């Protein structure tokens, strides 16, 4: 294997590209966990928003509209989950799984009805998200590769994690949301309308999932295939567990998962077969959680 | 009379909720079918006929329900005890793969092949299930994440093995990723010819069951349901596990060994799921085919069945047969009306969503509260008037 600097730079680049969808979903999961809405419907919401963003772009060829539709889908999915959990007192696990199952059925159904296929839909004439080229950096050899091929939403994801930190830790609204997470009764006794806060905050954060969906179907490749989300929603849930819902920590934990996915891609030409390489992100998720929780438990004991 | 009423309300509570959920989801399904420009009534007619229409379709439904029932029972055991594990899929995949391999490569008579294969499937299912339990107890990795990840890992590993290591030696087609086909003796026999004696042959019953042909796996899964019922409702373990599910701290206080409980529950649910995979191999596929469990979603449908039945073993059997019927009927609908069978996935999602909130409960409770409120205010007014007088 050729371990040149340029090669490492391209690994770094694909790490960035794989981590941003997970980061965005992880930010949403962070808000949900802080607001005490246990959301495992992230996966299905992601799948649906990827699909509807793709569909809009396919028919209107208007990228702004496509992103908007993706965000609205993300918000709608998260709203349903939050509403069923908070207002109707549903069992969170079941609500989330129901949304995942529904999304799977809906996307395959529409794929079949509109494109008459069950596999992959792609259209080479379709434009994806706008790529950002920073003028000075592009021509520098290594750094140019490191930050090449990134879309607007990729940069937005990094910006959002900082914005979310400010919102959650430096504003009154953020304090209230975190207060609800720590003790809903106390928050309610202070006059905070707990259910309203829970539903609105999680619904708004659902738009991040929409952005992540756009990245999947309109990012580096413009295509949609059955089950394109490939458990990224669950991985993001694990990433959120690692960083305790902290937006800046989410950067680190999603980078870890982005890296393992990139690793699986890098090793493609080695002796390991594709099917085993596909396991790497899932195995590393379990390993990361196990190691992290174990270390944490030991620290607490001391 | 009172006792009768109590029984009636219990009955209504158990059946009303799933009934309403299924009805609403079918209604939404009707809207979807209508929107895609198809005839609603005809589509549902085809669906009903394709699920339970005659002996042939009924046996297709029952055969499909076999794996669902086993997956559902696995969920019953685990969730009732408070462990919300969703690893049935991975356990089923390994159960199917291991049983197919053992029965293909092991020499000996057919019965022995099946028995060792079933033992192997339950062992591997239990081990894979215990793995997630161990990860939870030792490293605090939540069940949702560990089991979901293990499902994906199991599917990829099984896919790797069938592609490169244990591929069917006799297969000429390069694209068929599967293990070798089991010999005739190492398969489950079929039960058919019900009500076909001379006297009954031409009655409606005989005509209905003319093409009825179901493998033994279905009946084994019914036996498993009875065993699980006895285990959960009639033994000390069943009571302890229920207490653990309702309130784990109370269970601990009551002297239940949490460590032992966790592993016992995990082993039992793993065995059920592993056997489900093996039944599918011995009963209908006769080999392990890549993605055969992952893409059909047996474990997930089984989970929906268990939820519909509120984790009651017999209810799970009924719900799973119904869900399997929804799917075989959906396939018939796809063939004749061109509506993809995935619509059924959507309907299952809606059923789950509605079951999660105990819809009927909500309405009934609201109604009761309102009635009591009214009574109270009326009493207050009455008391007030009396005081005035």
Image: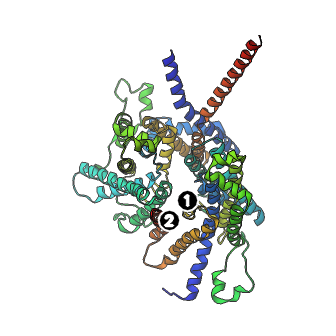
The residue at the far top in this view is: B389
The residue at which mark 2 appears reads as A285
Percent coordinates x, y for residue B47 in the rendering: 56, 39
The residue at which mark 1 appears reads as A234
Q: Are marks 1 and 2 on the same chain?
A: yes
Vertical position of residue B358 compared to residue A177: above or below: above
Image marks 1 and 2: residues in contact by CB distance under 8 Å: yes
Residue B65 visible? The answer is no
| B241, B71: nearer the viewer | B241
- How would you rate the neighbour count of disc 1 (Cα within 10 Å): few for under 14, some for 14-19, many for 20 or more? many
Q: Quadrant of residue A150?
A: bottom right
The residue at the far left in this view is: B108
| A15, A85: nearer the viewer | A85
Side of A144 relative to A64 (left or right):
left
Question: What residue is shown at x 72% (from left), y 72% (from top)?
Answer: A152
Q: Chain of mark 1?
A: A
Q: Disc 1 versus disc 2: distance between alpha carbons? A: 10 Å
Secondary structure beneath label 1: helix
Vertical position of residue A216 compared to residue B224: above or below: below
């Amino acid at each position: 294997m050729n371990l040149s600097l340029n090669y490492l730079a391209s690994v770094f680049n694909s790490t960035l590209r794989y981590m941003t969808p997970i980061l965005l979903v992880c930010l949403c999961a962070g808000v949900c966990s802080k607001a005490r809405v246990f959301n495992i419907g992230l996966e299905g919401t992601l799948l649906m928003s990827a699909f509807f963003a793709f569909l809009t772009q396919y028919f209107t060829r208007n990228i702004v509209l496509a992103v908007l539709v993706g965000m609205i889908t993300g918000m709608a999915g998260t709203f349903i989950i939050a509403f069923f959990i908070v207002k109707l007192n549903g069992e969170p696990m079941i609500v989330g799984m129901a949304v995942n199952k529904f999304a799977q059925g809906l996307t395959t159904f529409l794929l079949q009805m509109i494109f008459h296929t069950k596999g992959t839909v792609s259209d080479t004439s379709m434009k994806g998200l706008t790529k950002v080229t920073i003028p000075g950096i592009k021509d520098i050899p290594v750094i140019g590769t490191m930050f090449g091929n990134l879309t607007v939403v990729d940069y937005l994801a990094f910006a959002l994690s900082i914005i979310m930190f400010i919102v959650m830790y430096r504003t009154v609204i953020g304090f209230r949301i975190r207060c609800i997470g720590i003790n809903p009764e106390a928050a309610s006794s202070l006059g905070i309308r707990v259910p309203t806060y829970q539903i609105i905050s999680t619904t708004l954060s659902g738009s991040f999932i929409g952005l992540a969906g756009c990245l999947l179907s309109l990012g580096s490749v413009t295509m949609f295939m059955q089950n394109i989300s490939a458990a990224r929603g669950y991985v993001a849930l694990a990433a959120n567990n690692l960083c305790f819902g902290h937006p800046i920590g989410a950067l680190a934990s999603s980078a870890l998962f982005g890296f393992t996915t990139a690793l699986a891609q890098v090793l493609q030409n080695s002796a390991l077969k594709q099917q085993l390489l596909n396991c790497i992100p899932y195995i590393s998720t379990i390993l990361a959680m196990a190691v992290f929780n174990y270390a944490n438990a030991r620290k607490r004991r001391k | 009379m009172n006792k009768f009423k109590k029984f009636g309300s219990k009955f209504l509570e158990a059946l009303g909720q799933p009934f309403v959920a299924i009805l609403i989801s079918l209604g939404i399904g009707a809207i979807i079918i209508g929107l895609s420009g198809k005839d609603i009534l005809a589509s549902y007619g085809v669906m009903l006929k394709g699920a339970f229409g005659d002996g042939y379709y009924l046996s297709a439904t029952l055969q499909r329900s076999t794996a669902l029932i086993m997956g559902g029972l696995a969920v019953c055991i685990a969730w009732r005890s408070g462990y919300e594990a969703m690893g049935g899929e991975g356990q089923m995949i390994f159960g199917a793969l291991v049983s197919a391999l053992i029965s293909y490569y092991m020499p000996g008579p057919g019965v022995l092949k099946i028995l060792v294969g079933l033992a192997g499937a339950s062992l591997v299912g239990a081990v894979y299930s215990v793995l997630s339990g161990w990860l939870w107890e030792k490293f605090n990795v939540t069940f949702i994440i560990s089991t979901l990840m293990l499902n994906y890992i199991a599917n990829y590993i099984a896919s790797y093995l069938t592609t490169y290591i244990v591929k069917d030696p006799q297969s000429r087609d390069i694209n068929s990723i599967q293990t070798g086909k089991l010999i005739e003796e190492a398969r489950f026999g079929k039960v058919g010819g019900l009500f076909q004696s001379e006297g009954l042959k031409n009655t409606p019953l005989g005509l209905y069951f003319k093409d009825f042909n179901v493998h033994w796996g279905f009946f084994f899964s019914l036996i498993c349901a009875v065993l699980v019922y006895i285990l959960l409702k009639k033994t000390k373990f069943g009571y302890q596990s229920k207490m653990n599910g309702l309130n784990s701290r109370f269970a601990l206080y009551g002297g239940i060994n949490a460590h032992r409980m966790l592993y016992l529950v995990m082993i039992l649910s793993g065995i059920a799921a592993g056997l489900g995979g093996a039944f599918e191999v011995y009963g209908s596929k006769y080999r392990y085919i890549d993605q055969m469990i992952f893409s059909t979603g047996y474990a997930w449908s089984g989970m929906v069945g268990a939820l519909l039945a509120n984790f009651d073993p017999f209810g799970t059997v009924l719900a799973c047969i119904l869900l399997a019927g929804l799917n075989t009927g959906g396939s018939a609908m796809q063939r004749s009306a061109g509506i993809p069978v995935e619509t059924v996935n959507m309907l299952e999602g809606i059923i789950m969503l509605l079951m999660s909130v105990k819809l009927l409960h909500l309405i009934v409770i609201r109604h009761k509260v309102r009635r009591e409120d009214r009574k109270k205010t009326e009493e207050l007014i009455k008391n007030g008037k009396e005081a005035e007088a």
